[in-house]
Amino acid sequence: MKNPNPSRAIALCGTEQPDTPGRILKAGPMTVEFDNGQLRYLKVNGVEVLRAMGFLVRDENWGTYTPAISNLSIDQRADSFSISFHAVCKRSDQEIAYDAKIEGSRDGNLIFDSTAIPKTDFRTARTGFVVLHPLKGVAGFPVEVEHVDGRIVKDKFPELVNPIQPFLNIRALTHEVMPGLKATVRMEGDTFEMEDHRNWTDASFKTYVRPLVLPWPYTLKAGEEVKQSIKLKLGGSASGATNTAADKGIEIGIGQPARHTLPPLGLGVPAEEIEHAVKQLGLLKLAAPRFLVCHFDPRHRHGLKELYGYRVLCEQTGAEAVLEIVIESVEAYKKELQQLAEMVKQSGLKLSSLEVVPVGDLKSVLPGGPRPPAPRAEQLLATRAPPRRAPAARPGRARCDPGSPCASARRSA
């Protein structure tokens, strides 16, 4: 139900849950924010070295637990710091606890140790450390990768978004933070690999524990210790850098209106929502969508009725039609596409664009995993429509069956 007088927190953030600020700690030239068991925004003289570092516990469905932290001790000294705490992650049927210790030294080096012991058999998709490298000064720049077998390979962080893991079987990563200063992140206790987090709209490169090629979810046996550590070591000198970036606040300037303030905005319309949308055409018109994404899936027996309904919605709102179709067959995809082309012509739905999705691509596939069988994109794009037949309805008017969405729309018009 709509709240006519939302609180300030709801109006600004959509939630009443407070955003508790972390604590800033210093060790030599390094600053870092400690936030509920994790380290964030690790910087050297204001230059970001790592976006985040933390020991994370996830359930079998990749849901991340919020740890209950106790016995927290933070000792900020003149040029170094130490942190220790106990954390518990649990639900009604499983529980795991871990003890963590963090040491930041005067030379800017850091060690994050964690020892976890499941109290019960614990089903998880991932339990262990995650390290995030930022993009600025990193994407497209050189990196030295030490693998678990001892090999050292000189490479580069991806400049363009990489859909698969750029680096596998990682033991350590070394990159240049600024001229004369390098940072080495060494990861012990398991085999790590990296994914390009931009695939998930996050501005980082994510190095995580346990290769995705291994089965998941997996079970940590009750009482069996899980011990891992992350060590950050700086090499060289940071004396040439300045800390102006750390001291300077964010500046926002208001300029002249741009010629193009927003990209075209549209709405997705699942087939099961067509009739509801037709009944609320007034509201839909107020939204003024530039286009409607019209979903068509033969597995759900979508056909002419749905295409007629999409035509009504697009004509009544003035929106362009983007038809998103699912292709079931790997071998007979041409026949499917040709039959659909015939139905689109018969319905009178005018398309601005077409999205073709093989059913195999609807299955989530982790980076590097085997893809399900599906026609290749170039095969789908090369499919031609069958020769045009005589129209089944009068020009400019779609045929409506009694009880269809378009029939109800005409009665209400």
Image (cartoon, grey):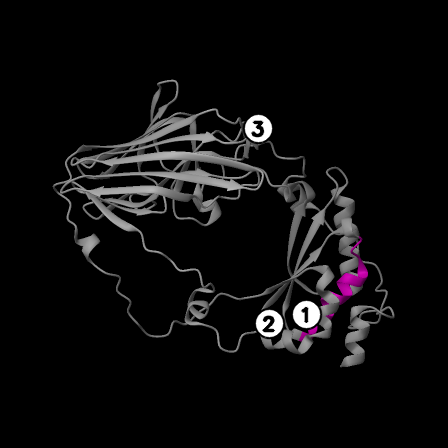
Which residue type does callout 2 highlight?
Met
Which residue, given by chain and number where applicable, does mark 3 sit on?
A: 215
Residue 129, by quadrant, is top left
Name the image quarter holding the C terminus: bottom right
Question: Residue 362's spot in the image, x, y percent?
Answer: 65, 44
Instruction: Please tell me whether mark 1 or mark 3 is closer to you in this view.
Output: 3
Q: Residues within 10 Å of mark 2 (few under 14, many from 20)?
A: few
Question: Quick check: marks 2 and 1 in contact, CB under 8 Å?
Answer: no
Q: Residue at x 49, y 29 (%)?
A: 211
Instruction: Please tell me whether mark 3 or mark 2 is closer to you in this view.
Output: 2
Which residue type does callout 1 highlight?
Cys
Q: Which mark is residue 1?
A: 2
Question: Residue 34's spot in the image, x, y percent?
Answer: 30, 46
Which residue type does callout 3 highlight?
Pro
Q: Residue at x 37, y 34 (%)?
A: 99
Which residue, given by chain and number where applicable, does mark 1 sit on?
A: 314
Helix, strand or loop under label 3: loop
Q: Earlier in the sequence, mark 2 or mark 1?
A: 2
As measured in the structure, the alpha-carbon distance from the residue carrying label 3 to the one carrying label 2 is 43 Å
Query: In the current view of this chain or complex, which residue is farthest to the bottom?
Result: 413
Q: Residue at x 54, y 27 (%)?
A: 214
From which residue to which does the magenta span run? Answer: 301-316
State yes or no: residue 308 in magenta: yes
Residue 59, by quadrant, is top right
Helix, strand or loop under label 2: loop
As measured in the structure, the alpha-carbon distance from the residue carrying label 1 to the one carrying label 3 is 46 Å
Q: Is residue 393 left or right of residue 44?
A: right
- Residue 132 visible from this viewpoint: no
Q: Is residue 384 left or right of residue 23?
A: right
Q: Residues within 10 Å of mark 3 (few under 14, many from 20)?
A: few
